[in-house]
Amino acid sequence: MRYIVDHLPPGTTIKRQLLISNRTDEARRIDVYAGAAAVAGSEFRFGEGRAANELTSWITLDSSVVEVEPWGEARVRATITVPPAASRGERYGVIWASATSAPRSDGEVTQIHRVGVRMYLDIGPGGEPVSDFSIGELRPARSPAGEPSVTAQVTNTGGRAIDLTGSVTLSDGPAGSRAGPFQVGQGVTLPPGGSGQVVARLPAELPNGPWKIEVNLESGLVKRSISAQIRFPDAGQVGKRGSAISRMTSGWTVAAVVAGLLLLAGLAVLVRRSRQSPRPPSGRPRERVSAGH
């Protein structure tokens, strides 16, 4: 997923340029618009259709529709104007690029494909709030079908929303065996002060253990790790929480370009910072990753 992430004082105006690329052999009519989003239930949730919120009311686009030739490109500029009286806090939204396919011959189905750039805007005076999180309880379990999993409780202890990714690795198992790394499930977003769970699902053939587990999670360039001793239970049961061995932390300040939108159904969108943009904030990934809804 790609992001537009900024900390902006009230009264600030920034501009972002989107490069829309048609990676198909047909001309495309692309609708470009801002949509509402929210962070709730440990997820970044997109509003339905063209639902609006406070942030979308601050956004203007120099083009709402572009015609893109086969293998061609078009550019759209987004201007975000924060009102002088805007209150402190984070706002969430999405800039969508949407293409509608030609109706099928039976006239019953029309497909709409859209890709979007998430927006995380923190409003307030002074510098950007620190991004941080902590890893708490680790709980092993097995599904009724015998598939093992590990759930990690995470708390956002910073002042910005976080998107969690990471992996778990098992070592010191029966006969000195090792396994992994296994990726944790993606899509967990926590608001400041929020708590949630990330889950890693593991191969069914793993023995119960005991194991040493290392959980490595990150949000942007903020990274946290924890090691613990665990034992998986029998099928259909939840095991005892892991006994922590050590915790590790690391984090850096980001000073990089915010990217935009990648490929989905023949579209690619790129967000670039304008020269007038303020210094980029910390704690959020700037690498190019796929986005969509």
Image (spheres, rainbow, N blue to C red):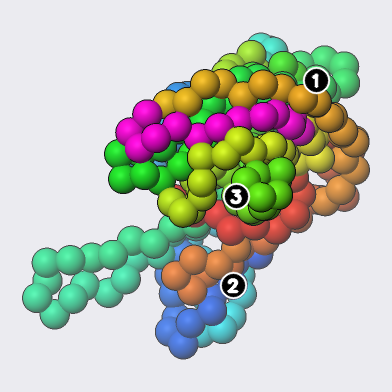
**Disc 1 target residue:** 129
Query: Can residue 190 be seen here?
Result: no
Compared across the picture, whether 88 is left or right of 256 comes to left
Query: What residue range appears in magenta?
Result: 225-237
Compared across the picture, whether 274 is left or right of 144 comes to right
Q: Is residue 233 magenta?
A: yes
Label 2: how many Cα within 10 Å (few below 14, some 14–19, many 20+): many
Q: Is residue 277 magenta?
A: no
- Image coordinates of residue 30 in percent, x first then y, are 46, 64
In this rendering, the answer to whether 8 lies above or below 188 is above
Label 3: how many Cα within 10 Å (few below 14, some 14–19, many 20+): some
From the viewer's perspective, is the residue at label 1 or at label 3 nearer? 3
Near-viewer residue (135 or 235): 235
Q: CA gap, disc 1 to disc 3?
A: 29 Å
Q: CA gap, disc 3 to disc 2?
A: 31 Å
Element carrying mark 3: strand
The answer to whether mark 3 and mark 2 are in CB contact below 8 A is no
**Disc 3 target residue:** 183
- Dot 3 or dot 2, earlier in sequence: 2
Query: Can residue 19 be seen here?
Result: yes
- Image coordinates of residue 154 in percent, x first then y, are 62, 24
- Dot 1 or dot 2, earlier in sequence: 2
Query: Who's the residue at 47% across and 26% down the image?
Result: 239
The answer to whether mark 1 and mark 3 are in CB contact below 8 A is no
Query: Who's the residue at 53% across and 76% down the image?
Result: 22
The quadrant where residue 241 appears: top right
